[in-house]
Amino acid sequence: MLLLAACAFAACSDNPSIGKRHKRSGSLLTPVSSGNPYEVMVVAEDSVWKGYAGKAVQQILDKHLVGLPQDEEQFHKSHIEPKHFDNITNLFRNIIKIEISDEYTMAKMIVEKDVHSTPQIIITIHAPNQFDASVYITEHTKDIESVITSDEINREANDLYYEHNIKFAKAVKEMFGCNFYIPVDIKSMKEGDNFIWASDDGLSSIQNICIYSLPYVSEKMFTKKPYIALRDTIMKRNIPGGHPGMWMQTNPEFVWTKNINVGGMYAMEARGLWEMRNDAMGGPFISHSRIDKKNNRVIVVEGFVYAPDKMKRTMIRRLEAALYTLETPDQIEEEEKKQNSK
């Protein structure tokens, strides 16, 4: 049954490279890129930036990130004209260039990596006119979002392979047989029954990551309502509040789920809001539910944030990247076979 379920889920699609380990990027000859994660600089003439094409790109960059308690754009944007794109500005980490010219016969998108700096992604959109450019950009909204988001996730997840909380990774390996890496500053740890919770114990904001497992029962576990019910049961048992009658639970009105691909394997992503029952605490969470075929179980990894009066996009994005480092026992075994066959 488990194998059939995995095959049924194989049709899901997101960027298949997310979650695959790469060699650390960088070169002595390539400068380090500037800008912060999820910052995008658009290079276009003022007339293009203010016209159809520029507005189409701005709609993508200004779209709110799903699953946050307040409105926050998924990207931070800036704009410069091509004449200002020089040896300093071309070091920016995420760049979208819009080039309009009658030399082009049709709209087209080119994606390049680490051209002027490392890590860097440059998306160039060519078109004969603004209307064609705007139509093309609108039709490829998901592609543009995915290119930037996937690259940012890979950058941070890849760094975690080389620098992470070793104590937490060891505990996860011993309890679940998985590889799972989290930032070094998330170091306070509590272990339960098939459950590990780590926190950074911040003063004004708290970033948390947990991992737990459940016996695989049916593919319905990878649908919204059963997922929420199972999550609430696990969290009630493992994350109580400060007084009796308080525990973490899911706000069912604000949960979004979708199928994604993590390193070539199926996962269900859930985003939404959590709250502390009978208390005023709450915030956003993101989780991945994965199938562990070798042990006939489901592994769930989750990041959640408590940061009242603060913007939370950067924190939840950071935790999201960590979720992509999870490697189930069957994945580890497969990787070892590949290494031994070389």
Image: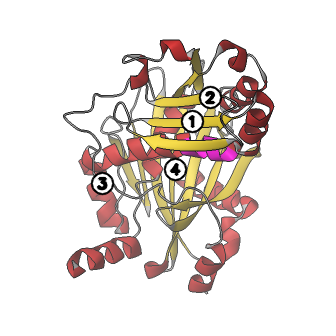
Earlier along the polypeptide chain: callout 3 or callout 4? 3
Is label 1 in a helix, a strand or a loop?
strand
Residue 212 drawn above or below residue 199: below
114 or 16: which is nearer to us?
A: 114
Could you classify mark 1 by the number of other residues whose Cα lies within 10 Å: few (under 14), some (14-19), or many (20 or more)? some
Q: Mark 1 points at which residue?
A: 124
- Classify residue 45 as left or right of residue 167: right
Earlier along the polypeptide chain: callout 1 or callout 3? 1
Earlier along the polypeptide chain: callout 1 or callout 4? 1
Q: Nearer the viewer, mark 1 or mark 4?
A: 1
Q: Mark 3 points at which residue?
A: 169
- Classify residue 199 as left or right of residue 142: left
Residue 82 drawn above or below residue 157: above
The amino acid pointed to by label 2 is Glu
Magenta segment range?
Answer: 142-147
The amino acid pointed to by label 4 is Glu
- Classify residue 215 as left or right of residue 324: right
Q: Mark 4 points at which residue?
A: 302
